[in-house]
Structures are given as C-alpha cells and as structure tokens.
Image (cartoon, rainbow, N blue to C red):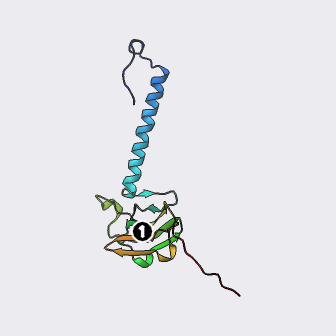
Amino acid sequence: MFENKKSFFEKLTGSLNPSTENELEERELHIRGAVEKKDREKDTGGWIEEDNGEGQLTVDVYQTPEDIIIQTMVAGVKPEDLNISINRDMVTIKGRRDGSRSARDDNYFYKELYWGSFSRTVLLPQEIDVDNSEALEKHGLLTIRLPKLNKEKTTKIRVKSL
C-alpha cells in the first residue's frame, strides 16, 4: 500500500514529491487511528463502547430450517436485568452488568471486564413469529429462538353466513 522508495531526485535534493507526502500523511493517519482504537479497546476491555457510554454485545446469529437463533454472553447479569424487545424484523437486547470493585483503579494489572450498561440491536434477515419466540439463559449464554414466518403457508378459512 505504501512504498518507502525515493526517486533519484528525492534522494539528491532531500525533498518529497506531493504523492509521497500524501502517502506519508495517509500512513500517519492510519497508524494514529489504529493506536487510538487500541487505546479505546484497552479502556473498555475489547468491548465496543458507543458514544452514549453503553457497551455493545457481541452476538452469533444463525438459522435452522425453522428458526433464527441469536446467542450472546451475558455472564454476571441476572435474567430480570435483561430487556429483550422483539418485532417482526428486529431484536434489541439491553441490560446492565454491575460489579463490585474491591480494588482501586491504579492497583489493576489488567482491567478487561466490561461493567455497566450494554445493548445490541440485530436486524433479522426475514420476518419472525414474535408470539412464539423464546429466550433462555444457561451458564451465562443467552439463546433467543425466533421462529420464522412461513410466507408460503396458506390457510383456508370458511365463510360464515350472517
């Protein structure tokens, strides 16, 4: 992407041509951005912290022939502290992980666990049956099962006479 080779003229005069200057500026911005990202990860323990101060959950989303499955780790969060909102094409998971800190910040060697509010919104690849959805938590793993709507299924109804 970036080449450090100088032309004969650049070696002779010690100047840089404009395209080389732009490449160096791009490289500096790229490096600075990576360092800033690493600093943010260091502060939040690898979690993506959004502008509103909430952490963002990492999720696995996959499908079976009948369901869409969402899985995420919510270890340390009581089930009653989780709020899951579902509509036909979107799921939002919100919660808060409170921890008891027995050590001062300057006594930590590593500080990678995320404490505080978190949320995640997942757009679904197809419509689901909201009424038959379920969420289960076991050993810190939250699994949300969302039955797919079968748009090809047809139902016959009888016409009643009044």
Q: Quadrant of residue 28?
A: top left
Q: Can you say whether 39 is above or below 25 in the image?
A: below
Q: Can you say whether 60 is above or below 30 in the image?
A: below
* Closer to us: 72 or 27: 72
Quadrant where the C terminus sits is: bottom right
Residue type pointed to by label 1: Glu
Q: Which residue carries the number 1 mark?
A: 66
Question: How many numbered discs, if any?
Answer: 1
Q: Position of residue 18 (x, y in %)?
A: 49, 22
| Residue located 34% across and 65% down the image | 104
Q: Position of residue 107 (x, y in %)?
A: 30, 61
Instruction: Give the SS element for disc 1.
Output: loop
Q: Quadrant of residue 106?
A: bottom left
Q: Quadrant of residue 143?
A: bottom left
Q: Residues within 10 Å of mark 1 (few under 14, many from 20)?
A: few
Q: Position of residue 108 (x, y in %)?
A: 30, 60
* Closer to us: 134 or 128: 128
| Residue located 38% across and 71% down the image | 142
| Residue located 48% across and 72% down the image | 84
* Closer to us: 59 or 98: 59
| Residue located 40% across and 43% down the image | 34
Residue lying farthest to the bottom in this orientation: 162
Q: Position of residue 151 (x, y in %)?
A: 53, 66
Quadrant where the N terminus sits is: top left
Residue lying farthest to the right in this orientation: 162
